[in-house]
Image (cartoon, grey):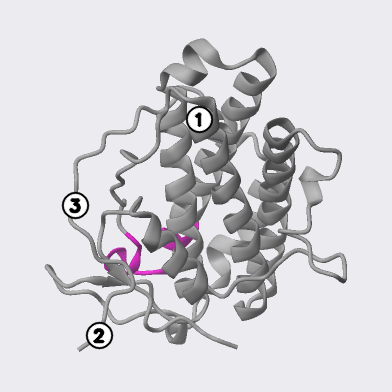
Amino acid sequence: MKKPLIKVQKKEFAPIEKNNSRRQFLKMGSLAVVGSGLLLACSSDDDFAEPVNPGEVFDLGSGDVGILNYAYALEQLEAAYYTAVLNGSYWMNGASAVEKKMLEDFYNHEVIHREFFKAAITANAQANQVLPELEFDFSGVDFGNRDSVLSTAIVLEDTGVSAYNGAGKLLANPDFLVIAGKIVSVEARHAAAVRSIYLESDTAFAGDSIIDSNGLDLVSTPNEVIAAVGATGFITTEFTANNLPTG
């Protein structure tokens, strides 16, 4: 029997989307151009997981489609988190103008990333091989408190960067790698920005906790990232990652 890496009870969550998210998604020039090739690039059945039967726990799958589903899960998490941030009292009433703009930008970028992966995977896999919309529980975050909001954002952004760094080498299709490289550069900008604002240090944007002795970003494997994310309790939808490539 497969042991789920993430298995928790589902809860209701209804994110409130900004009206301009689709327009901004369509305006992402370079991402859209490369993406048009990505939507047609994956045609091998070897990249597809076996179809999931109704009621069966979803597995991210194997090959490139599995890695795309993995990235899609992370982007769903980040988009949901910043949706909650923008509906919280800290962003509405307590954040500075700079902080409000930064977090709104994060929200818009993560929604774009989420919708891009959804479209790409949908175009390359059967409907029941696309990771469903996940549900989340952010009750452990105080969205009225600056420390809680920004420290959690740092954890999510740092995790996202290390996740893309670790997943890139697992992609077989170079078009997918180009997309991953573009997205991780945005995630890294997020991580640097929120670290600089919250930690208030000249070196916080690239501190020793995220940069190794060779001056390189940290790298995390999918299993490490999924275990870490699962430990937060943020994702409440059960899924497994038993078939992702490892090298």
Question: Marks 3 and 1, how far apart in space?
Answer: 26 Å
Instruction: Say what secondary structure mark 2 lies in.
Output: loop
Instruction: Say what secondary structure mark 1 lies in.
Output: helix
As drawn, the label of residue 2 is 2
Please state if 87 lies on the left or on the right of 185 as rendered: left
The quadrant of the picture occupied by the C terminus is bottom right
130 falls in the magenta region: yes
Q: Which amino acid does label 2 sit on?
A: Lys
Question: Marks 3 and 2, how far apart in space?
Answer: 19 Å
Please state if 216 lies on the left or on the right of 12 as rendered: right
Q: What residue type is labelled 3?
A: Lys
Pick the residue in front: 41 or 73.
73
The image quarter in which residue 172 lies: bottom right
Please state if 54 lies on the left or on the right of 124 as rendered: left
* Callout 1–callout 2 Cβ contact below 8 Å: no
For the stretch drawn in magenta, what is the main secondary structure? helix
Residue lying at the far left of the rendered structure: 55
Give the magenta part as a residue range. Answer: 120-131
Residue linked to disc 3: 10
Question: Marks 1 and 2, how far apart in space?
Answer: 37 Å
Which label's residue is closer to the chain start, 3 or 1? Answer: 3
User: Is residue 243 shown to the viewer in this render?
Assistant: yes
Residue lying at the far top of the rendered structure: 93
Pick the residue in front: 42 or 85.
85
Q: Identify the residue at horizontal 87%, vertical 65% (top origin).
A: 215
Q: Where is residue 24 in the image (x, y as percent from the top left)?
A: 58, 31
